[in-house]
Structure formats: structure tokens, C-alpha cells
Amino acid sequence: MPVAPSEPEVRRETVLPAGVDEVWDALTSEALLEEWLADEVELEAEVGGSVTLRFEDGEERRGVVDEVVEGERLALRWWRAAGPETRVEFIVEAVSPGRTRLVVAERLVVPSPITMRTSVSATRLAALPRALSLVAAA
Amino acid sequence: MDPLGPVFSALADPTRRHVLQTLAHGDPVTASGLAAELPMTRQAVAKHLVQLSQAGLVRSTRSGRETRYALEPRPLSDAAGWLAGLGAEWDERLARLERVLGERRP
């Protein structure tokens, strides 16, 4: 049996021969994205923005932008027509002039179980001991 | 429903990974048999076996009054394959990105 993976995530890190601004452009400009990520890219680089990718083999992927911190972090969730939803996070970090570290992590989005929660206000909880002592005295 | 979610949820627990590792190395075994080999009670093993079964990682066969459990390797290799595929995609993309950025040098 292969070592069982414990996390549904892949992570890659590389140092690129470009400054932070250039790398950020490469992550957010449709024209640049089309040179390395997919054949056709539509991306609205803002939270809630839509993402559409078309690949050479005809595959299409849709997504939505989750998080944008200009020049630092871009996260989006995407899914294939038949496939699980995953979340992709790019982190950009200057190493030295003209050299930038890019970390990319893609992780399976696992729907969390719906939890039932009863919320009791803090003031009500604080009143409980006194209420109980009154009942005991009666 | 997508099978990967339940598989990874099942694998997230180190105890369950331990159960799978144990199943991988031997013949089909009962819950009691597993509990004897692992540092946990039969009840704890049974709970883990339920989740592993639901994720398709373990199959059970009844013989008489006994239920024996065995590793179902396919979902595990599918999950590992899925991750490997993802990694390979990123390796390719990052190689292209590196080339594209390198070619922009004046």
C-alpha cells in the first residue's frame, strides 16, 4: 500500500526570475495567464470575481476568486464540469531584486458537516448559578 | 457524489491510517483481531471501520458470525493518483511561467 496521503493538498514552491510586480501581473493579467495557466482565461481579480479557463484539450473550468491581497496573495476556488472543487492559493514574496518566491497550494474543498449550534448569551449563562441557588432555597 | 472527500476525511485521522496500514499487511481480520494488534479498544476500531467502509477504503465479508475486514486499495490509489496529477499539472504550469518571465528580460 502506498503511504496514505493525510492531506488533500499539493504544494509547490519556486523562485522566479522576476520582481514581485511582474509575478503579480502574471497571476492577475488575463493576457499573461494565457501564456502559462490555460489557453483562454477570464479573470476578475477581486473577491467574488469570476474565473473561466479553457484548456487546450477543450476542458473548461469555472471558478471564483476568494481572496486578493495585492502583490501578496491570490486565492480562488475552481471546479471542472465533472470533478471536485479545489482551492488554489498563490503566495508571492520578494527574495531579492528581480527574484520572487511563488508558493502555490491546491487543496480539495471538503464540505464541512452542518453543525447544529444553540447559542446561549453570556449574560444568561452568568445568571445561571444565582437562579439555581434560588431554586434550591425554595 | 464525489468520492475523494470521504476518502480524505477518512485518511485525515492518523489512527485510521494506522488501521489501513495494518489491514494492508495481513489477511482479512475481525474488529477484535485488529483491536488486539492496535492500541485501541474494539469499540474504537469498530467506529473507525465504519467510516473507512463508508469511504470505500475497507470491505467486509461475513462468514458465519464473524465479519472480516480487508483493505480496498482502489480508492487509496485513486486519491494518491489524483494528488500526483495535481502536482504534475503545477509543475508544468510553473515551468511555463518561469520560461515566460525569463523571456521578458530585456
Image: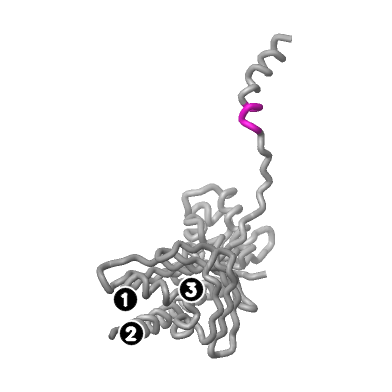
Residue closer to the observer: A65 or A31: A31
Q: State the mark number for residue A81.
A: none
Mark 2 or mark 3, earlier in chain: 3
Q: What element carries label 1?
A: loop
Can you identify the residue that label 3 sits on?
B83
Q: Which colour scheme is used?
A: one colour
Amino acid at dot 3: Leu
Residue at (50%, 80%) from the top-left corner? Answer: A30
Can you identify the residue that label 2 sits on?
B104
Residue lying at the far right in this picture: please name it. A138
**Quick check: A58 left or right of B37?**
right
Residue at (27%, 74%) from the top-left corner? Answer: A98
Percent x, y for residue B60? 63, 65
The magenta segment: A121-125
Number of other residues with Cα within 10 Å of mark 2, as a class: few under 14, some 14 to 19, many 20 or more: few
Disc 2 to disc 1, how far (Cα)?
9 Å
Figure check: B99 above or below B69: below
Can you identify the residue that label 1 sits on?
A18
Chain of residue at mark 3: B
Chain of residue at mark 1: A
Quadrant where the C terminus of chain B is found in the figure: bottom left
Chain of residue at mark 2: B
Amino acid at dot 2: Arg
Amino acid at dot 1: Ala
* Same chain? Circles 2 and 1: no
Q: Marks 3 and 1: which is nearer the front?
A: 1
